[in-house]
Each structure stands twice: as structure tokens, then as C-alpha cells.
Amino acid sequence: MEQKEDCNDWEQPLLKKETDVAAEMAGQQLALKPIKPVGLSWRGVSLSIPLKGKKNKGKTKEILHQVSGTAPAGRVTAIMGPTGSGKSSLLNALAGRVSFIKGATLEGELSVNGMPVEYGVVRRLCAYVVQDDVLYSFLTVQETLTLATHFYLPSALSEQEKATYVRDVINALGLAKARNTIIGDGQVRGVSGGERKRVSVGVELISNPSLLFLDEPTSGLDSFQAQSVMSAMGSLAQSGRTVVAAIHQPRSSIFDLLDMLVLVSEGRIIYAGSRRGLILRLPGMVLPPSVLPQ
Ligand SMILES: Nc1ncnc2c1ncn2[C@@H]1O[C@H](COP(=O)(O)OP(=O)(O)OP(=O)(O)O)[C@@H](O)[C@H]1O
Ligand SMILES: [Mg+2]
């Protein structure tokens, strides 16, 4: 059974349809500051990691092998594949986070808007939403985002200007109703799972990045919450941002929200291109009408 979005708001109908969520999100006016569109493309990305243990001295494991693809500006690009296929590794490689792994070697070319760049350049341009977010449970949504302004925005900005950023992010992510709800935890009820994920995205959006990476933004959420998160990502893409998400087994209604797909298996590319292009490539595949992506 679908869960109610916010247990603190008893005025809402108990079951809200997914189409309502999509419509709500589509109606959001993104008041965030204009951003510079960033189209990302990569070619021949290979990642190897040294194996641990004395027996394996000098040996490496190839996690990604010659992976290529594109993530255009203003589109949601999904990296999909079975568990252990290399989705997070590819996301980390593209976001310039592989340097955190000792002894890792990363090869391949990255381009931003058609210009070849170093991996570190993308790291400076992007925001990265990790799978297991860390938020203070006793702060409200508004307080959480206000705290982020102190970390991410120049101290020269006035409190008034910072408050405007917070308001814009809250509106952009459809969090207005949860503005004064605490984040909560296992002991104290707070925002819903989908709202919590959107707050994590909001913290990263405070710096107004052009490029947003998300690792499994929908995992652990029920279908309603997962839809609300991905609808918000669609709205962010419509405002010109580039959204790249590693996503595991999306349901068909979420699959329909994706523009570009990068399918990986055992670190190798199976398909990189538009969602429609994939469906055209699989003409023989017969699915029940209720799950057939449109
Ligand atoms: N730092 C590391 N050291 C050793 N092996 C690693 C490291 N990071 C990833 N791997 C291995 O690389 C492979 C790909 O891992 P990755 O986390 O990218 O997969 P994934 O597709 O994101 O999986 P999941 O859906 O479970 O999150 C796995 O076999 C994993 O064990
Ligand atoms: Mg992963």
C-alpha cells in the first residue's frame, strides 16, 4: 500500500496518486538562479583498483572497462545495471571522486560542452548526493538548508539573500509543506523518506550546481516516494541542470522520466543513448502492457 507523504498533514488525502505528484512537480516554478548548462561526455573510461592482501601484491581488479556515454545538459541520465556492475564506480569516476581510492588508476577522456577536461574540473562543477545521507535529525527542513547556506555560500551574502536561496530550493524541490517539519530519525517521526532524500538534494543545490550526481536516489523508498524524488530531478533538469543518477531497477513510471540511459554489466557498456533508442533496439521484447515503458 502506498504511504501518505507527510503524517503531520492530516488535511491531505490519504492516498495521493503518482500522477498528482508529477503534476505538482511540473507546476513548480524554479526560482533558482540561472545556471551555465554543462553537457558531459566520456570515452573509454577504465578504472582499476589494486587487490588487497599479500598474495595479491601487484595485482589489480578492473572495475570499469572502456565505458563511453553522454549526459546532456537539461536531461536526466540514468546509469543502470545489476548490483556490482559498476554503477557507483562510474558515477564516482565521472564526478572526479576516484582519487579517494588508494592506488586506483583511471583512464579515459572527459569532455564538458565538447571541450576535453581533467577529472578534477568536473568535481568542481558538480554536486554529489551520496546514497546514505547524513542529516541532523533534530533540525527542520528549513533549518537544515539554512545551515547549508553557511557552508556553501560566500559569507559576504546577507542573511536576507541566504534566506532567498533557501526559499528557492524549498520551492524547487516541492518541500514547502514540510518546511517546518524536523528531519527525524528512528525514534522521532520526521519528514517522509522521499522528502528526506529531497532535502539531501536541496543541501547540494544550495551552491546552485550545473551538474548533479546522485547515487541510488530512490533505493529504500516506496514507489510513491521514489516517484516524488525522480519527478523533482526531472524538474531540475528542465531548468537546465544535468542530472546523472545511478539507479537500480526503476519501475516503469520512473523509467519514463529518464531521458538518457547508460546500461552497464560487469563494468562494460551494454547501451548508451536515449531511452527511446533502447526501446527501439529491443523490438522483440514483449512486456505486459502495465509495465511497458511508453
Ligand atoms: N574500492 C574498491 N575496492 C575493491 N573493489 C571495489 C571497490 N569499489 C568497487 N569495487 C568492486 O567493483 C564492482 C562494482 O562496484 P560498484 O559499487 O560500482 O557496483 P554497483 O553497480 O554500484 O553495485 P550496487 O547496485 O550494489 O550499488 C564490485 O564488484 C565491487 O565489489
Ligand atoms: Mg552502487
Image (tube, rainbow, N blue to C red):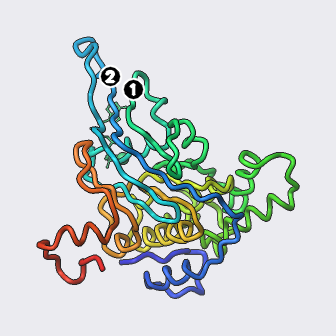
Residue 184 in view here: no
Q: Residue at x 37, y 44 (%)?
A: 43
Is residue 61 visible in the rendered image? The answer is: yes
Quadrant in the picture for the C terminus: bottom left
**Three-letter residue code for mark 2:** Pro
Mark 2: secondary structure: strand
Q: Quadrant of residue 268?
A: top left
Q: Residue at x 67, y 68 (%)?
A: 170
* Viewer-nearest residue: 43 or 263: 43
Contact check, label 1 and label 2, Cβ < 8 Å: yes
Instruction: Tell which of 194 and 123 is nearer to you.
Output: 123
Q: Position of residue 290 (x, y in %)?
A: 24, 82
SS at mark 1?
Answer: loop
From the image, which quarter does the N terminus lie in? bottom left
Question: Which mark is first along the chain, 2 or 1?
Answer: 2
CA distance separating discs 1 and 2: 7 Å
The disc label shown at residue 104, or none: 1
Queried on whether the Cβ of the residue with tag 1 lies below 8 angstroms from ligand 1, the answer reads yes
On whether ligand 1 comes within 8 Å of the CB at mark 2, the answer is no
Where 232 sits versus 158, above or below? below
Q: Position of residue 153 (x, y in %)?
A: 76, 49
> Which label number is shown at residue 50?
2
**How many labels were placed on the picture?**
2
| Relative to 182, residue 1 above or below | below
Residue projecting furthest to the front: 115
**Quadrant observed for ligand 1 in the rendered image:** top left
